[in-house]
């Protein structure tokens, strides 16, 4: 399994666009400088009252298919 580490910082209001479906994808910069694109729906389990914040490991398989998103630091 491979992973890319990303830092996310969305307020609850900003995340509302993803939650309602107005935005379907998240485009983020990885800690190593790469740009990654992934479905906004994978963030739903990580939404807190103040939004989505922290460093996450975006994990994917050998076919570059998403497998999981895990919070690794605040």
Image (cartoon, grey):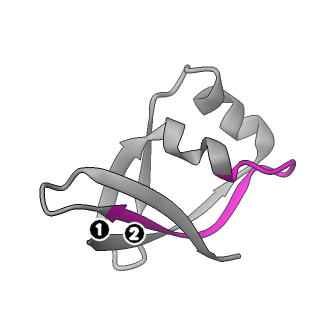
Q: Quadrant of the C terminus?
A: bottom right
Q: Residue at x 34, y 48 (%)?
A: 37
Residue 10 x/y as whole percent: 68, 51
- Is 57 included in the stretch rendered in magenta? yes
Q: Left or right of 65: which side holds 5?
A: right
The residue singled out by tag 2 in the image is 30
Compared with 61, 55 (above or below) is: below
Compared with 23, 29 (above or below) is: below
Compared with 34, 25 (above or below) is: above
**SS for callout 1:** loop
- Label 2 – label 1 distance at C-alpha: 5 Å
Q: Residue at x 22, y 61 (%)?
A: 61
Instruction: Determine the residue located farthest toward the left in the rendered image.
Output: 63
Q: Residue at x 52, y 36 (%)?
A: 41
Crowd around label 1: few <14 · some 14–19 · many ≥20 (10 Å): few
Residue 55 x/y as whole percent: 58, 72
Q: Residue at x 76, y 48 (%)?
A: 11
């Amino acid at each position: 399994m491979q992973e890319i580490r990303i830092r996310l910082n969305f307020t609850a209001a900003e995340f509302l666009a993803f939650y309602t479906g107005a935005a379907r994808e998240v485009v983020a910069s990885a800690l190593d400088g790469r740009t990654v694109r992934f479905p906004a729906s994978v963030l739903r389990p990580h939404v807190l009252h103040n939004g989505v914040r922290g460093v996450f490991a975006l994990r994917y398989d050998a076919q570059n298919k998403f497998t999981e998103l895990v919070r690794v630091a605040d």
